Amino acid sequence: MKDTFAFLDALQQLARDKGITVDTLLDALANALVAAYKRMPGAAEEAVVTIDPDSGDIRVYGQELDEDGNVVREWDDTPKDFGRIAAQTAKQVILQRIREAERDMKYEEYAGREGDIVTGIIQQSDNRYTLLDLGKVEALLPQAEQVPYERYEHGARLKAYIVEVRKTTKGPQIVVSRTHPGLIRRLFELEVPEISSGVVEIKAAARDPGHRTKIAVWSNDANVDPVGACVGARGARVRMVTNELRGEKVDIVPYSDDPREFVMRALQPAKVKEVLLDEETGTATVIVHDFQLSLAIGKEGQNARLAARLTGWRIDIKSESQLAEEEAYANQEWAEGEWVQNEDGEMVWQPAEGGEAVSAEQWASGESSGETEEGSEESEESEPAPPAASADTEEPAAEAPVPKAETEEATP
C-alpha cells in the first residue's frame, strides 16, 4: 500500500513538473498494461485496465463482445503477479509519454506562429544550414533562406522570421528565414510604436536581400507623418533596422492610392517627369529627364526592379531623348512588305499589296521590272523606302562638294 501511494505521489509530482495531467499519464499506463496483459497465456481477447487514481489499485477486466462490438460479459481477470508487470511497464510508458507530451507542448508553443520573428543564438553553421538555439527548441535556417555573403558566427544573437513549423517524431522543426520581406515588417514593428499600434501601416515591401529594401508606408492619422515615424529622430529607428540587417539599405516611401503617384514615389530618389499606365498589359511607362535615367534604373536595374515589385506594375523607364526618337521613328512612313528569298537564293522585297518582287540592287538604282523610268522616278518620290535586307547592303556614297575658290579660278 505504501508503495502504491508513493507511486501516485511520484506520478503527481512528475505531472506537475512536466506540465502533464495525471489522467494523461494514467491513460497511457492503462493502455500499455492492456498490451502487456494480452501477451500473457490464457488472456482474454478483449480486456480493459482500470487504475484507481486515489488508491492506485490496478484491475484487469476481460470482456466478451457481440458482433456489434457491445460488451455482453465482463469479469475480473487480474493476474496474480500483475503488480510486477505493472511496475516494469509503468517506467517505460511514463518516460515515453513524457517525451511525447514535451514534444507536443513544444510544437503547440510554435504552431501557428508562422510570420513571427524570433531571436536565437547561432549554434552550428555549414554549407547546408545554420542552427539557432531558441531555448527549448532549435530553429533551422536553410541556405536558401540565408542572405548571400552574410556570416553567422557561433554564439552570436540573430533575429529571423518563422516561415514554417513542422511536426516530426523528434519534435517540432522550425524553419526560419533571413531573406523574407516579412522580416522587414516585423523589425519595423519592434522599432516603431506607431506601426505596432496600427497608426502607421506598411502597405507593401520589396527586398533584394543583403543590398536594398523598399517599403511603402501609410498613416491612418493625418497628424502623423508615416515616413518620419519610421525614420525616427536623426534616423535612429531605421538605423536599428539597418544594423540588424547588417548594413542593408532601406528606402521608405509614402504610399498612394493613385497608381501613377505610387510609381513615381517608388522610383525615388529619382525624380519622374511623367507616368503612362497601360492597364491591359499592366505596364507603367515612366518618363524621366536624361540625367535622371541612370538613377531611376539603379545599379544593375535594382531601383527599377524593386519599384516594380513594390507597386505590382511592370515598369518601363525611358528618357526624354529616347521617347523623342521613338516618336520620330513611329511617324516615319515605311513600305509594307517583307524580304523573302527567291528561287535563285537572292533576297528580294515582296510588297504587301502584291506585284513583282524587287531586289535590293533594283531598288537602290530606282529600277523595277515592268516599270518605265518615269514611273520609277515617281515611285521614288511617292513610295517610302523598305527596311534594309541586311547590314551588308551598301549605301550610295554622297558626292563631295567642290570648293568655291577652285571653282571661281577655273571659270574663264
Image: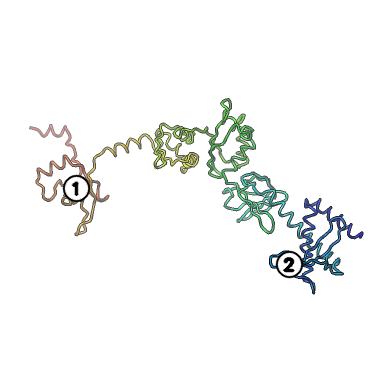
- The tag on residue 65 is 2
- Residue at 80 percent of width and 63 percent of height: 49
Labels 2, 1: front one: 2
Quarter the N terminus occupies: bottom right
- Give how far across and how far down residue 350 sits, in percent: 20, 51
- Residue at 84 percent of width and 62 percent of height: 58
Determine whether the residue tagged by mark 1 lies in a helix, strand or loop: loop
- Give how far across and how far down residue 363 sits, in percent: 17, 47
- Give how far across and how far down residue 359 sits, in percent: 18, 51
Q: Which residue is mark 1?
A: 353
Q: Residue furthest top?
A: 223
- Give how far across and how far down residue 112 sits, in percent: 64, 47
Q: Is residue 7 left or right of residue 336?
A: right
Residue in the foreground of this view, choosing between 118 and 267 = 118
Give the residue type that dot 2 points to. Leu
- How busy is the neighbourhood of tag 1: few (under 14 within 10 Å), some, or many (20 plus)? few
Determine whether the residue tagged by mark 2 lies in a helix, strand or loop: strand
